[in-house]
Image (cartoon, coloured by chain):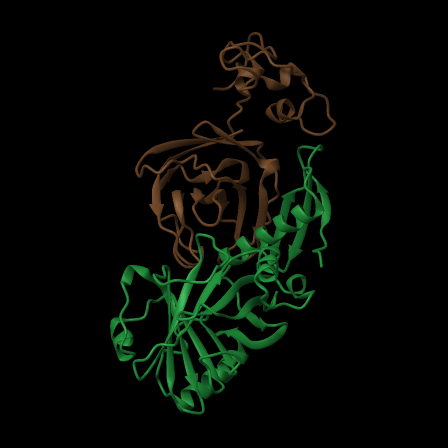
Chain colours: A brown, B green
Amino acid sequence: MALQSSGYIRLAGNDTGRSVAKELDLGTSGVHTPTISLGQNNVRALAQRTGSVSVGLGHLRGKSASLDTQTVTVGYRAAQLYVNSGYGSFTSGLGTTGNRDIGSMSDGTFNPKSNMYIRGLWYSTSGSGMVIFSLRSLTTTVANSGWTTMNVAGVNFTRSSATFSNIDNASIGATNWSWTTSSNPFGTTVNATKVVTFT
Amino acid sequence: MNREYVDKTDLEDSAVTHAALTRGSTYIEVPKGSSSEEEIQLLLDNALLQAALDNFHGSQSRDDVYCDKVIVRQDYSTGLPEAQALIQELQAVFPDYEDWDRHNHNIVGRYTAYREPYSNSGISFYNFGEKPSESLLLSFNTSYLNSNLLEWYGLKFDLDSEQVMLKVVFRNYEGETPELPTNPRNFYAAIHNQDGTESEWVDFYAYATPKLIREFCAEKGLSYPLPPTTHTDCAVVWCWGFVFNKNTLEYGPVKAYARYNIGE
């Protein structure tokens, strides 16, 4: 939930809607008293005061750590040549022009990038395994910014540790963030529901 | 030969530096972290490979096929003028054998007798997006489990003998193989003749970085297919082919498919 727009706000502590650390899920769960400062990057991002500008507790009022939430109903497609495969919700088929046809996702658009259509959120079983977050950007240049962490059913993936790609193409242009991992955060149960939050 | 990239500070975390690379319409950033230069090059190779596979049907392209550091074939997307010239040749000798212009992303290329079982020069035609029909398979006196077939196949048109070979592409091979570089997207191909016989030479294909293939070739005493700078000159080396004899398990030539996206 968002930090309260009135009343006290503090950096650390376990009080929901009052503690910045709890909003950002920093420190020990149920305690949330990490070393934390107003100037650190994730606090600045939450306050929407990145860069060298000043930041105060007042900037954090009403702010929510979650930039976007997607509810993914897990589907599966077996590995096939030149098509996406794996577990989650994504576009398969030849090329990437189609809408998502594996699993489902609500609401399926990404707020931090002007509600761009999400091609997929899935675990690719190709190669050594990879978590992929993909937007249908077509000819729009999408910067590697705008969010800090993607949480898939409790597992965090940081944007800055992802391999980022942007393909500029009028029919199949896409922007991807991907992480190589042998662990599948979507699980293998078809029709299971997984919540993905972006902060 | 290393790829040349630029260092780029993360837009929101000044402690993070990315290696940034642009190839045609593809832009890539990989986090450098504490990675060695070799590891960064591998990350870039992997990212380019993934982007190429994702973009497979997105652009017109030419593949230079290398064996033993020499181009043995050039394949063109059927939307390109070079491909149309080859299709006219095919249509002249094999009229309406296939729907040559079914879409712009099939592939056509002239081959030579650079490897067995090819004994003459000819033209290859690869039909993507369709499994070979049962009637096509039967016309070559063969049959496959449909679920094992990939959604494309090749036809090899021998311009001298006017014979056709069918290249069937499939996921799982049940016979014995020599040691091969594996990953879950490997696949195989078998070549069938119109007289119902099958070549004893089987193709194995892999998606892998140049480093992995170079090391594998060195370990097995095989000739690495690429000249030193090709993998950085082209858009991406998107596929590697190994040929082996299914009876003796002898290795044939190793092939590399160097992709050049056209019009970028």
Horizontally, residue B220 falls left or right of residue B100, namely right
Q: Nearer the viewer, residue B258 or B82?
A: B258
- Report x, y in % for residue B237: 58, 62
**Would residue B57 be seen by someone viewing this image from the given angle?**
no
Q: Quadrant of the C terminus of chain B?
A: bottom right
Residue B259, relative to residue A31: is it above or below?
Answer: below
Residue in the picture at 61% in, 62% down: B235
Q: Quadrant of the N terminus of chain B?
A: bottom right
- Number of labelled discs? 0
Q: Residue furthest front?
A: B248
Residue B138 falls in which quadrant of the image? Answer: bottom left
Residue A102, relative to residue A5: is it above or below?
Answer: below
Q: Nearer the viewer, residue A2 or A79?
A: A79
Residue in the picture at 27% in, 63% down: B145
Horizontally, residue B33 falls left or right of residue B203, namely right
Residue A170, relative to residue B122: is it above or below?
Answer: above
Q: Residue furthest top?
A: A8
- Report x, y in % for residue B75: 52, 74
- Report x, y in % for residue A175: 54, 48
- Report x, y in % for residue A50: 67, 28
Horizontally, residue B14 falls left or right of residue B55, namely right
Residue B152 falls in which quadrant of the image? Answer: bottom left
**Would residue A15 be seen by someone viewing this image from the given angle?**
yes
